[in-house]
Image: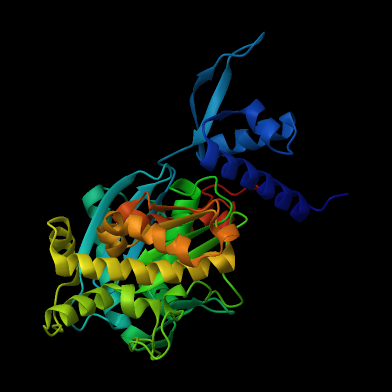
Amino acid sequence: MKSPKHTVDIRLQNKQIVMRLLCFHEPMSRMEISQDTTLSPGTVTNVTGELLQEGILAKTGLVESVGGRPRTLLTISPNYGYLIGVDLGETHIQLELFNLARQKLGAIRYGIAESGNTPDYYVEQISSGLKELASSTGIKEEAILGIGIGVPGVVEHNGYVSIAAPMWNWQRVEFLNMLEAKINLPVYIDNGAKAMALAESWFGAGRGVEDMAVILLGTGIGAGIITKGSLYRGATNSAGEWGHTKIELNGRPCRCGSQGCVEAYAGAPGIISSLKTLSGESAKQDEDQIVTIKNLVEAYRAGDSSAVQVLHATAHYLGAGLANLVNLFNPELVVIGGWAGLLIGEAIMDELKKYVAQYALAPSAAHLKIDLCQFGQDAICMGAACLVLEEFLSANKKFMRQSVEG
């Protein structure tokens, strides 16, 4: 005889199956759910009945049935709960609030103060941003299922969560514990490139693609690798630090302490450094990176020879770095994102593809596509919200407003 605990576990697993299917393929009828899963029609009826009663599912219309009554279409109830995604960048903090249909309901963006790279500063900014976002949208904090945060640097998950971000002088900072002590909500943290990869894989440019790489180009550079439909993390979740692979031995110094990294040439400061070197100017410590890159792209489009030379060189460096990644992982798709990637992406795309084809092995690049990310500047926030959605779709009881034993 099955124990009560075993029965509850099976029911939770069945809920997870139904919720995941509807999240990615809604709306669906009960018969379609049964046909697309291993669940019997009776089990689907029971599970969907419970989820409807709990308010997690909603009826969204009818579809005609051949020789029978119309079938009810089911969907995840958009307003059962809400997700907050945070892009914790080096130049800004952006918070966005989504419902379970992944519609953006509100957003707040803060610039980073000069002294704003301390953990305490970010904790305070996220906490106040949460309150402001809830107030401006009229969403009560208790209706928020959790907060996902995409951060630069390495986020280790080896028994605890800590962040190593050399550009901020963070060495294994237990940022998750600091936030949870301040915010009375579940908090999930991962590297921004990984978060972006999750969003683009699930709902964006990479939907339906089994093997892909998502490249984040900003002040820093990172990559999220999707293999066989799942995010590749490595032993301690530090996989994807592609920006610190080497493209020139004894090359430019990189902020990581090494030399010749992709980031030193194709991150925003590296691009600006190339521009200043060419013009004979000195880079300013307080220079607005976004404004400078925007001006560079505008000059490129106007035919300015220096801008053309700098962006062609950037495409060359990126192309060589991407060719290494293509040879190593053999992705079907490479998606370019991040604020700098989106600013320069269209301008360098043809050159970038040319250099990837030149340096990658022909079999590895034969069917490769390179494109811009679909979620634009919202990609990291959307991906961070997906960290919360992932937990919600696990049918974890902490997210259920009625106990499954009830």
Relative placement, left or right, of 89 versus 113 is right
User: Is residue 183 visible in the rendered structure shown here?
Assistant: no
Q: Position of residue 222 (x, y in %)?
A: 42, 71
* Residue 248 percent across, percent down from the top left: 41, 83
Find residue 342 and report its horizontal and vertical position in percent.
29, 58
Q: Vertical placement of 203 versus 65: above or below? A: below
Task: Residue at the far right: name it.
Answer: 1
Residue pictured at 51% horizontal, 48% vertical: 401
Q: How many marks?
A: 0
Q: Is residue 167 left or right of residue 75?
A: left
Query: Could you tell me if residue 228 is visible in this image?
Result: yes
Q: Is residue 13 left or right of residue 1?
A: left
Which residue does the image show at 25% across and 66% down from the upper left? 311
The residue lying toward the viewer, choosing from 58 and 288, is 288
Place residue 170 in its image quadrant: bottom left
Coloring basis for residues:
rainbow
- Residue at image location 38% in from the left, 53% down from the top: 373
Q: Depth check: give the residue in front, 159 or 406.
A: 159
Q: Quadrant of residue 253?
A: bottom left
**Residue 45 locus on image (x, y percent):** 67, 30
Q: Quick check: 24 above or below 87?
A: above
Q: Quadrant of the C terminus?
A: top right
Up the image or down, 196 lies above or below 309; here it is above
Residue at the image point whose x is 67% and y is 35% from the top: 36
Judging depth in this view, the residue of 157 and 55 nearest the camera is 157
